[in-house]
Amino acid sequence: MTIALNTTLRNDRADEITAFTGASAKLRFYTAAYATQLAECICDATAFAPAASGGILTLNAISPGVATGVGTAAAARIYKSDGTTLVINGLTVGITASNINITNTTFGIGDTVTVTSATITEGNA
């Protein structure tokens, strides 16, 4: 049997992510299995929208980053602004239908990394 959480509870849990993350979080992109860090983007001063809706937490504006590695982005992590406190691990990366959608998943050193949308679904996903 699949566990299903009440939507209000899902929103509350997602909003706790917002509170924990704080301002100017770091969104880091990696190759598969986190073998190589490819780039880092800085989230808006408030990383997430003011409140989750339907158990979905949407990231606010994310500044474009510059690739420092070469490879295909397959995963992402979000860190607090200190760069060491991991907030979320295991985010999917793609051009569409991923947690983090970007304009191009193939990175070369110096390439601009642009996030087109980013969401996290809490529970029942």
Image (spheres, helix red, strand yellow):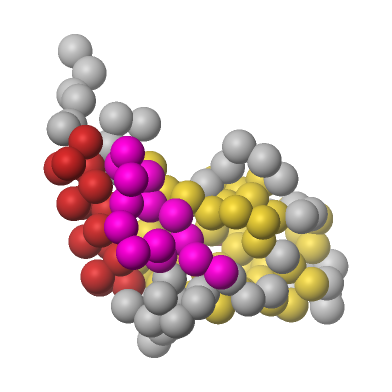
Above/below status of 2 relative to 26: above
Residue located 60% across and 63% down the image: 29
Secondary structure predominantly adopted by residues drawn in magenta: loop
Question: Which corner quadrant holds the N terminus?
Answer: top left
Residue located 58% across and 42% down the image: 98
The stretch drawn in magenta includes residue 82: no
* Residue 25 spot, x, y in % from top left: 44, 76
| Residue 57 seen in the figure | yes
Q: Is residue 101 left or right of residue 46?
A: right
Number of dots carrying numbers: 0
Residue located 44% across and 55% down the image: 58
Report the front residue among 99 and 68.
Answer: 99
Q: Outermost residue toward the top?
A: 1
Q: Is residue 79 left or right of residue 8?
A: right
Q: Is residue 29 left or right of residue 18?
A: right
* Residue 51 spot, x, y in % from top left: 30, 57
The stretch drawn in magenta includes residue 60: yes
The quarter of the displayed image where residue 16 is located: bottom left
The quarter of the displayed image where residue 34 is located: bottom right
Residue located 50% across and 77% down the image: 44
* Residue 46 spot, x, y in % from top left: 40, 76
| Residue 84 seen in the figure | no
- Magenta residues, start to end: 48-61
Report the front residue among 86 and 97.
Answer: 97
Question: Which corner quadrant holds the C terminus?
Answer: top left
Q: Outermost residue toward the bottom?
A: 82
